[in-house]
């Protein structure tokens, strides 16, 4: 029976796995048989042969059972959910949002459940924090994060209890408590991901060294060194398995988790055989079958580790990987400087090798990401590849020269003056900083579609956080910022704002229809348009008394960001205009970029107009900020309209006219892939599917049948 003819996907996967086991174990069976025939006195040789034979027999049994439609008793269902820890965090987030007016009985029942979920999360976090690759500061941050989430949960439950059986609108204290625990949980999740990447970054640096040391010791017949090397290799293999599990626990990629688990299973079975093959070689170091057997397992190990690394990289976000690796390189640079000052040659070599291996791994991961995610040539892709080439071809040779010079200085330290050593130390620091800056440039080039070039992607927006803590109205107790002012507007003004927002939403529908159909990879025009739209939506939410923008300074900063993105958009459009021949489209684009500049400038002015608060004698507050709010909405609507027309005209100018140059296109216009839909639609229930009982079938009377009957002669008349 062919594999593709089996309908059950689990059985198909079982056959595919069994076939892979048979194919992989064929060279193992041949080499282990030769070793066992030549060295029958060694129990290890028989052990390897028996293990390989058992795996082949098990694979054949699996194929037989799958062909007969049987699943073994030990069959484990395939993974169909995200990682354990990320799934627990998601459930905890969902469960913290209780219904709006829970009863006391409901709270008493749900409170222990939330606390148990949090205790389970904390236990898993402690396990990750105790891993050897987790940095001490990261571990402390996770512990502090767990304590912060515990305190936020207690505060939230207290607010729920205080507002139990309350059918009115949720008070601000409860909303603030919900927002606080959500933020604390998100910060904890971020630190956990970085701790996992800490372990991944260290474990995948140079995976071939432990096995190489063990093989060299075995070939030399040095049993003492071999014992130490085999222990180190076993620890390395166990660490790879641990890192695979850590990566799975914080991943939401179900298919990727399946692949990593499969690789972990293969490595768990393979590394004891590799050690046994080396044990044979250390006793019979001159045996050709033993050397060939070791070579077979060596190649298999390298191949399997490469598959594991690719699988783990696939479920790890490249943002976290680059951020953590950049911090690790800075840490290694500091270790090199300390070793250089102490004349510690071994520590210096280890740290400098770590920098070299990390930079190589960054290049490999980024090249793989670009190859998989970006198919069309674009400026965005070219910028990333250029940054990788600069790191490998220009920066790393300078760093290697600096390392060589520093090693020579450590060797000749006794005959060198302090001034010379200081100069050499400064030269090494300069060459190391170039490596750090090179990795940082790769990171900026890769993440430019998510953050502005001037933003530091590792730092939180502390300026915005400080602005949110400022009390703009210290003389009024119930109001702290401009967003609170918008909440207390009278109903008449709110209705006017709602009408203006409806006009804006209509323009937003046109924007989505035009912009969302384009793929934003390699198209900076679409990226900038989406950024501007997000900021404008936040400003519109501000006029309704909600959203992330709170203070007047937040609105001003948002308007500045729109202006910066508008300037970048105009620069791109100007390049398209230069390559476009004289036409109505070119004239339209010239008009649109002027409109974008005008509306951005208008939003800058409007955002600086602060709403006034007037307090009457009776203590009732009145707000006279309607004009500012409506002007802000109208400016956003006009700017969005100009952006929509600019996108349309840019597409026409880029694709419908012959270009004056033959260089790489400024932007790549590629339609976004449609959403996946089922190939076979489910049958909807209809009357045709209804099966009636025999008693419900109505029989026709004989007279009716005879009246409908026509003879052949009668039919021929017609």
Image: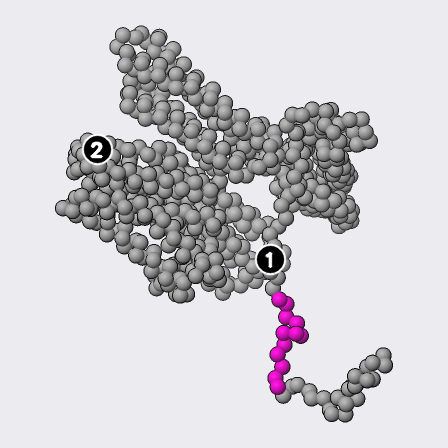
Residue at horizontal 23%, vertical 47%? 33
Task: Point out the image quarter for the C terminus.
Answer: bottom right
Mark linked to residue 151: none
Q: Residue furthest left?
A: 41
Where in the figure is residue 221, as x and y percent of width and height? 17, 33
Quick check: can you spot residue 282? no
Up the image or down, 173 lies above or below 237; here it is below
Classify residue 527 as left or right of residue 324: right
Closer-to-camera residue (713/442): 713
Closer-to-camera residue (99/584): 584
Classify residue 40 as left or right of residue 68: left
Closer-to-camera residue (520/566): 520
Asked if residue 690 is among those painted magenta in the image, a careful observer would answer yes
Classify residue 669 as left or right of residue 105: right
What residue did someone put label 1 on? 679
> Tag 1, which secondary structure?
loop
Where in the figure is residue 433, as x and y percent of width and height? 44, 21
Q: Please give the range of residues in magenta.
A: 683-694
Where in the figure is residue 227, as x and y percent of width and height? 19, 37
How many numbered dots are placed on residues in this image? 2
Residue at horizontal 50%, vertical 27%? 388
Tell me which corner region of the image, top left, top right, bottom left or bottom right, holds residue 582: top right
Main SS class of the magenta portion in the image: loop
Closer-to-camera residue (223/175): 223
Residue at horizontal 60%, vertical 60%? 680
What residue did someone put label 2 on? 219
Up the image or down, 397 lies above or below 127; here it is above
Q: Could you tell me how far apart the alpha carbons at marks 2 and 1 are, in whole angstroms?
A: 58 Å
């Amino acid at each position: 029976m062919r594999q593709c003819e089996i309908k059950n996907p689990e059985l198909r996967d079982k056959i595919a796995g069994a076939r892979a086991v048979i194919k992989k174990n064929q060279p193992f069976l041949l080499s282990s048989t030769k070793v066992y025939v030549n060295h029958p006195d060694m129990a290890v040789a028989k052990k390897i042969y028996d293990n390989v034979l058992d795996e082949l027999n098990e694979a054949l049994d699996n194929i037989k059972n799958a062909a007969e439609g049987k699943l073994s008793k030990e069959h484990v269902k395939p993974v169909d959910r995200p990682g354990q820890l990320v799934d627990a965090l998601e459930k905890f987030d969902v469960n913290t949002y209780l219904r709006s007016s829970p009863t006391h009985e409901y709270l008493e029942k749900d409170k222990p459940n939330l606390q148990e979920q949090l205790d389970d999360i904390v236990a898993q976090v402690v396990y990750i924090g105790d891993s050897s690759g987790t940095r001490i500061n990261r571990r402390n941050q996770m512990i502090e994060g767990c304590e912060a989430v515990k305190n936020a949960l207690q505060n939230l439950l207290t607010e729920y209890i205080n507002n139990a059986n309350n059918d009115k609108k949720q008070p601000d204290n409860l909303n603030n408590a919900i927002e606080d625990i959500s933020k604390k949980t998100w910060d904890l999740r971020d630190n956990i991901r970085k701790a996992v990447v800490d372990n991944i970054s260290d474990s995948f640096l140079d995976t071939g060294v432990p096995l190489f040391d063990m093989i060299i010791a075995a070939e030399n017949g040095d049993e003492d060194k071999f014992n130490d090397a085999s222990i180190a290799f076993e620890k390395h293999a166990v660490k790879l398995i641990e890192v695979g599990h850590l990566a799975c626990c914080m991943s939401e990629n179900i298919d990727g988790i399946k692949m990593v688990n499969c690789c972990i299973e293969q490595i768990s079975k393979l590394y004891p055989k590799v050690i046994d093959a080396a044990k044979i070689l250390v006793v019979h170091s001159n045996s050709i079958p033993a050397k060939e057997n070791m070579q077979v397992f060596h190649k298999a190990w390298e191949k399997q580790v490469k598959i594991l690394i690719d699988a783990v990289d696939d479920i790890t976000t490249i943002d976290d990987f680059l951020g953590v690796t950049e911090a690790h390189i800075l840490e290694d640079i500091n270790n090199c400087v300390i070793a250089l000052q102490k004349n510690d040659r071994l520590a210096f070599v280890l740290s400098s090798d770590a920098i070299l291996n990390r930079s190589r791994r960054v290049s490999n991961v980024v090249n793989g990401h670009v190859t998989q995610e970006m198919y069309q040539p674009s400026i965005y892709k070219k910028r990333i590849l250029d940054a990788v080439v600069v790191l490998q071809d220009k920066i790393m040779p300078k760093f290697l020269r600096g390392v060589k010079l520093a090693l020579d200085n450590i060797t000749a330290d006794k005959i060198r003056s302090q001034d010379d050593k200081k100069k050499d130390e400064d030269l090494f620091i300069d060459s190391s900083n170039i490596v750090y800056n090179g990795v940082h440039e790769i990171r900026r080039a890769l993440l430019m579609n998510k953050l502005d070039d001037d933003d530091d992607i590792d730092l939180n927006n502390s300026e915005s956080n400080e602005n949110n803590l400022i009390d703009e109205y210290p003389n009024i107790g119930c109001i702290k910022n401009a967003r609170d002012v918008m909440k207390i507007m009278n109903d008449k003004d709110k209705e006017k704002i709602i009408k203006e927002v409806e006009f804006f939403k209509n323009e937003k529908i046109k924007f989505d229809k035009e912009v969302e159909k384009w793929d934003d990879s390699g198209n900076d025009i679409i990226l900038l348009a989406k950024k501007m739209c997000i900021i404008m939506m936040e400003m519109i939410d501000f006029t309704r008394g909600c959203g992330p923008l709170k203070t007047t300074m937040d609105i001003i900063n948002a308007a500045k960001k729109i202006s910066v993105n508008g300037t970048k958009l105009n620069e791109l459009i100007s390049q398209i205009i230069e390559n476009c021949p004289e036409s109505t489209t070119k004239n339209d684009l010239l008009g649109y970029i002027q409109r974008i500049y005008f509306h951005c400038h208008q939003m800058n002015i409007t955002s600086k107009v602060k709403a006034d608060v007037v307090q009457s004698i009776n203590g009732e507050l009145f707000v006279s900020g309607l004009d500012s709010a409506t002007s802000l909405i109208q400016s956003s609507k006009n700017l969005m309209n100009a952006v929509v027309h600019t996108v349309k005209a840019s597409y026409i100018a880029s694709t419908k006219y012959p270009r004056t140059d033959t260089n790489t296109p400024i932007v790549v216009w590629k339609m976004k892939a449609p959403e996946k839909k089922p190939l076979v639609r489910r049958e909807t229930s209809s009357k045709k599917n209804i099966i009636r009982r025999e008693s419900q079938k109505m029989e026709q009377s004989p007279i009716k049948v005879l009246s409908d009957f026509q003879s052949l002669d009668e039919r021929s008349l017609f």
